[in-house]
Image: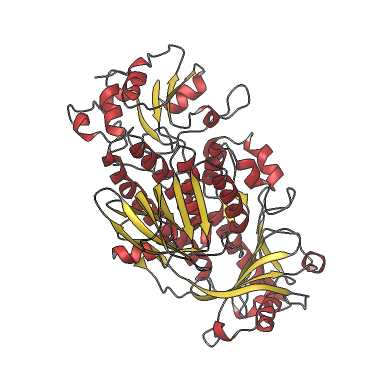
Amino acid sequence: MSAETMEADVMICGGGPCGLMLANELGRRGVSVFLADEKESTAFNPQANATQARTMEHYRRLGFADEIRAQGLPPDFPTDIAYFTRYAGHELARFRLPSAQEAILKARELKGPWSAAELPHRVSQKYVEAVLRRQAERLPGVTVRYGHRVADFKEDAEGVETTVVDRRGGTPFIVRSRYLVGADGPRSFVRERLGFRYTGETGIIRDFMGGRMFAVYLRCPDFYQRIPHASAWMNVTFNRDRRAFMAAVDGKGEFAFHTQLRAHEKEETFTDADARALFIAAAGIDLDVEVLSKGGWTAGHSLVAEHFQRGRIFLGGDAVHLFTPTGGLGYNTAVEDAVNLGWKLASVLKGKAGVGLLDTYELERRPLAIRNTSYARAFADSLGLFAPVAEIEEDGPRGDAARVEAGKYLGEHGRAEFNIPGVTFGDRYDGSPAIVADGSCPPADAPNAYTPTAYPGGRPPHAWLEDGSSLFDAFGFDWTLLVLGPIAEDATPFASAMNRFNVDLRVVRISGPEISALYEAPLVLIRPDQIVAWRGSTASEANRIVNRVLGHRDEAREGELTVLPSEMRDSGVRQ
């Protein structure tokens, strides 16, 4: 008896942030999706705890940023990063950040590197996944099945056949799709079947954030009453005995506690009582603790798969990059994978783009994964290679001096790890066939500095409009053409070029000088993932530009695209 066969445009293996975000991107574009994950549901454990501003901008683009921002910590809970000898001991340093409700107001005031439609939000991944799942399941054509394992897949010229097994029993069934995406985590079945290896560094040993770590999801209702310090989102201990970091999950008494294991400590032997003792050691006082879950993991990864795609099969999220969690970059990079791949798959499936557009996914995302894992490794080195001196917890002058020195270092580290507009907004896709460079040079890439630029290949500069709305809210869900300046350039050639492929193009006209100066060109083409694809002073080459960015390669080669010579770029003269 042959297995039942179901049909979908895209089969997604994995229901974490990458897979769920991809289902949302595709479903909103009218693409049918079948998503399977062998877990019984979305995450129970807190896992990642920081949603970067760029990720929040994508949630805003999809219409549920407010729902995400309402999750997790109470709206007035401070999102500070605080460093202590022990939680009930000495406070060494604190990097202050706004609460969720303050972030909404502050976003309206910030200019320069932190000008953004959304600021970061400190929220556990468990809450984010639940929102992403609810949003995906509301979309027609999106089927989400937890408790289902992908057992096999085979690719042919027309698509992919994936064998899916219900873990609760029943007959395996087949999902026939045009494409398969493996977003199935660090032990990815899809990646292993493709034979792709990780490259990079692993097994890095540090005094902290290197080697085996032990995670405890716990409830401690009287923590805030017993600890003699102001509340913080991230709580880090710095002593010779029990180094740990702990994120507040609900702001009431639930925490995600992670501690460095000593060489002789074996996680597989730890009972709940042992897990409680680890937390008590970090706290420095006896507390009433309920262990909700526990388990080990390895810090010291900085790994990127050698490939992200082959034929009709793509990989994203932890299946292609593994981070040490400093900087909170793993989950956010996974979401960006889904954003990048989603519009491209949809465009090809709907006949709007050439199949060559799909080849730009690996070309664009793999260098960014290498970049981001490198930044996370540097943050881990900064924290983990700085070891406490013996007298750090002593009373008296020697201890006081040690704590002052440690506090100075940790305060600087906190700013370096958590004030990262360059990491957050500085992703670039230079050299991609889906980008048309203009011959100028983008600003240097640096983690703690970001210069807004409309140089093609990066995030468009953000600005608040006169009516109080975000410029990003004016962008279309598909493509956008900004027409800037007091003399309106003719957008008709771009509209006609896009119309040839049935692509929706929103034309946004803004005459004010501020945004014109920010973008440095009267015409700017914005991709569906809110990346600048092209900018220039005339629409005369609209057909060739559109052919290129949509992956219609043969037509794009008909002629060379004009690039402004350096001596003419500043004057706005077109050669």
Locate residue 258, reporting x and y percent. 60, 71
Locate residue 435, reporting x and y percent. 32, 36
For the point 36% across and 38% down, the residue is 457
533 or 390, which lies in front? Answer: 533
Locate residue 378, reporting x and y percent. 45, 61
305 or 417, which lies in front? Answer: 305
For the point 74% across and 74% down, the residue is 289
For the question of whether residue 465 can be seen, the reply is yes
519 or 112, which lies in front? Answer: 519
Quadrant in which the C terminus appears:
top left
Q: Is residue 359 left or right of residue 100?
A: left
Where 196 falls versus 242 (above or below)? above
For the point 73% across and 78% down, the residue is 395
Q: Residue furthest front?
A: 1
Q: Residue furthest left?
A: 558
For the point 56% across and 44% down, the residue is 56
Q: Is residue 118 left or right of residue 164?
A: right
The answer to which quarter of the image holds residue 182 is bottom left
Where 495 falls versus 105 (above or below)? above
Quadrant in which the N terminus appears:
bottom left
The answer to which quarter of the image holds residue 219 is bottom right
Q: Residue furthest right?
A: 225
Locate residue 89, reporting x and y percent. 73, 72
For the question of whether residue 197 can be seen, the reply is no
